[in-house]
Image (tube, grey):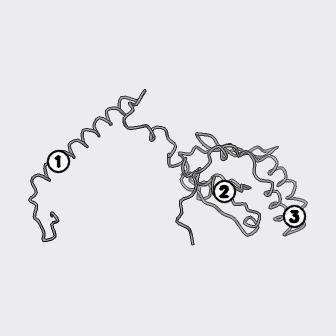
Amino acid sequence: MESSAPRPPVDEAAILAITRPHRDLWTYYLLGCCVFPPSLLFFAPYLWFRYQTMRYKFTDEGISMSWGILFRREIIINYARIQDIHLRSNFIERWLGLAKILVQTASGSSGAEMTLEGLKEFEAVRDFLYSKMRGVKDPAHHRPAAAPATGAAPHDTELAAALREVAHELRETRLALAKRAPQTVIEDGRHV
């Protein structure tokens, strides 16, 4: 059963500092190869180079992942493009304290566009990605209401003025309706 206690805030500095997978990922790769011992000769070198060259980079705009020596592959995703985030772990990954973070975008494929693997802080990374994709840290959303928007585009100030005018008219309408409505007193002294 999930607890309803709020989660502690995400430590952005710790997430931004993640650049490599945890060393337990190599253990996971080796255990996976040991299921079928002859595969150890063929897949272990590939997985070793994958593990050694895998790099993550979290920035204010997005996340990137790269790996490979001969055939270098790099995936860059802006936070605004993220559609969904899933955590997946099998028995061995749970035993090692690892999980895969599957990041999906609105691309044509049904699978994840990026799979972050070998992370011990997978829940914190997931929460960080959710906060970034929802725009929680967008400075425009955190601007104080009384402070003027410096450098704001003209259509932003026009929109703000129109919204203030609508709010003022709604207040006036509510007060006018409250004055017009007859109030009846019920036996216990409440107004209806």
Residue nearest the observer in this picture, 14 or 107:
14
Q: Residue at the spot x=17%, y=47% of the render?
A: 173
Graded by Cα atoms within 10 Å as few (under 14), some (14 to 19) or many (20 or more), the crowding at tag 3 reads: few
Mark 2 secondary-structure assignment: helix
Depth check, mark 1 against mark 3: the one in front is: 1
Q: Name the mark on residue 115.
A: none
The residue positioned farthest toward the top in the image shown: 151
Question: Which quadrant holds residue 94?
Answer: bottom right
Residue at x 80%, y 46% (from the top left corner): 53
- What is the distance, in whole Å, between disc 3 and disc 2 at their CAs? 29 Å
Tell me residue 9's x, y (percent).
57, 51
Q: Are marks 3 and 2 in contact (CB under 8 Å)?
A: no
Which residue, given by chain and number where applicable, does mark 2 sit on?
A: 122
Within 10 Å of the Cα at label 2, are there few (<14), some (14-19), or many (20+) other Cα atoms? many
Query: Which of the two residues, 149 or 63, is positioned nearer the viewer here?
Result: 149
Question: Does residue 114 appear to the left or right of 34 in the view shown?
Answer: left
Q: Which residue is mark 1?
A: 173
Report how far apart the C-alphas of labels 1 and 2 lie in the structure: 51 Å
Seen at 44% across and 41% down, the residue is 141
* Residue at 74%, 64% in the rendered image: 93
Q: As drawn, is 35 to the left or to the right of 156?
A: right
Residue 8: x and y in percent read 58, 55
Give the structural element (helix, strand or loop) at label 1.
helix
**Residue 158: percent from the left, percent from the top?**
31, 32
Give the x, y percent position of residue 101: 65, 57
Disc ID at residue 39: 3
Q: What is the quadrant of residue 77 in the picture?
A: top right
Q: Amino acid at mark 2?
A: Phe
Under tag 3, what secondary structure? helix
Give the camera-side residue of 130 and 35: 130
